């Protein structure tokens, strides 16, 4: 989960909501620059972070009793296996993109060295079975990674004040994209990668008015009972 500190407690965005926002961003990509396996790319982008369900997990709190932010998550082979299994049942192209994302996250982690080595071997087999190429997978994954990065910036509220730009990521075209906030509150992406000149996206947050919790069960109950807040925003070509 994405945990943001507020004056009253915590604003929490669940991983699946962040993934859905990434999928919405992906859906607006320019049609003439979409990857060959477009629908599968969108599905993988939406589901790339479904590795665990915060509302079912027990490891939810840090040492101070506050909710754990996603950045503190450690490699968990069982969770990765579960996500890959579900993805491969849907389609090997989707599983290949999820696998690439796991490599992106964990390849430099010594605890995941053997796991990532096996993923690379599995990728060779899956590429043949999926009737695709490593180049197609790379192009699709670069778009997934861009949408993931942009969604994370938004969900963490990292857009900069006074129209200052923050780097999002490189897209599948190799171009570096930036995000800024216009005076009217719209977000500006430059250069513009989407089909329409303006798009509207949304995600859900839960504002928890309590800083610490005695255990995961208490936090989970409060989180489940907390009213969901809809956050809509406009992303424009110009301010």
Image (spheres, rainbow, N blue to C red):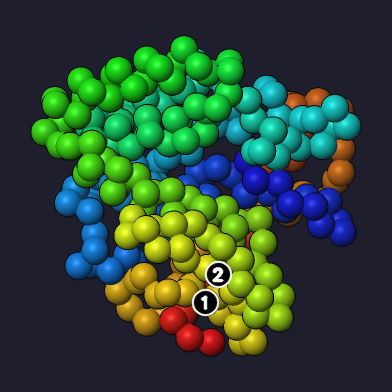
Q: Is residue 31 left or right of residue 67?
A: left
Number of numbered discs visible in the structure rendering: 2
> Of the residues under marks 1 and 2, which one precedes in the sequence?
2
Give the residue drawn at x 51%, y 53%: 149
Say which of 173 and 27 sits in front: 173
Say which of 196 and 224 sits in front: 196
**Callout 2 environment at 10 Å: few (<14), some (14 to 19), or many (20+)?**
many
From mark 1 to mark 2, how far is it between C-alphas? 6 Å
As drawn, which residue projects farthest toward the left? 131
111 is higher (above) or lower (below) than 59: above
Q: SS at mark 1?
A: strand
Question: Are the residues flagged by discs 1 and 2 in contact, CB closer than 8 Å?
Answer: yes
Say which of 200 and 103 sits in front: 103
- Image coordinates of residue 222 in percent, x first then y, are 74, 40
**Callout 1 environment at 10 Å: few (<14), some (14 to 19), or many (20+)?**
many
- Quadrant of the rendered image containing residue 192: bottom left
Figure quadrant of the N terminus: top right
153 is higher (above) or lower (below) than 138: below
Q: Can you see residue 185?
A: no
Give the residue drawn at x 45%, y 30%: 102
As drawn, which residue projects farthest toward the top? 114
Q: Can you see residue 35?
A: yes
Q: Is residue 60 left or right of residue 214?
A: left
Give the residue drawn at x 52%, y 77%: 188
The residue singled out by tag 1 in the image is: 188
Mark drawn on residue 155: none
The residue singled out by tag 2 in the image is: 179
- Image coordinates of residue 156 in percent, x first then y, are 66, 55
Give the residue drawn at x 29%, y 19%: 122
- Image coordinates of residue 94 in percent, x first then y, are 28, 36
- Image coordinates of residue 139 in percent, x first then y, are 28, 49
């Amino acid at each position: 989960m994405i945990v943001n500190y507020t004056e009253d407690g915590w604003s929490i965005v669940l991983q699946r909501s962040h993934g859905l926002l990434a999928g919405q961003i992906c859906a607006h990509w320019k049609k003439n620059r979409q990857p060959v396996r477009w629908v599968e790319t969108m599905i993988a982008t939406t589901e790339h972070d479904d590795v665990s369900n915060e509302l079912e997990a027990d490891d939810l709190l840090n040492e101070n009793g506050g909710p754990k932010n996603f950045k503190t998550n450690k490699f968990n082979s069982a969770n990765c296996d579960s996500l890959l299994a579900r993805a491969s049942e849907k389609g090997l192209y989707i599983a290949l993109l999820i696998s690439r994302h796991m490599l992106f996250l964990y390849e430099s982690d010594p605890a995941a060295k053997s796991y990532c080595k096996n993923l690379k071997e599995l990728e060779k087999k899956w590429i043949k079975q999926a009737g695709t190429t490593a180049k197609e997978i790379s192009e699709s994954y670069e778009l997934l990674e861009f949408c993931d990065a942009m969604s994370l910036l938004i969900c963490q509220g990292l857009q900069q004040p006074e129209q200052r730009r923050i780097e999002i990521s490189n897209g599948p075209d190799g171009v570096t994209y930036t995000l800024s906030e216009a005076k009217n509150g719209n977000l500006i992406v430059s250069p513009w990668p989407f089909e329409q000149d303006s798009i509207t996206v949304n995600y859900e947050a839960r504002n928890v008015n309590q800083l610490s919790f005695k255990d995961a069960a208490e936090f989970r109950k409060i989180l489940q009972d907390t009213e969901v807040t809809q956050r809509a925003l406009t992303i424009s070509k110009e301010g």
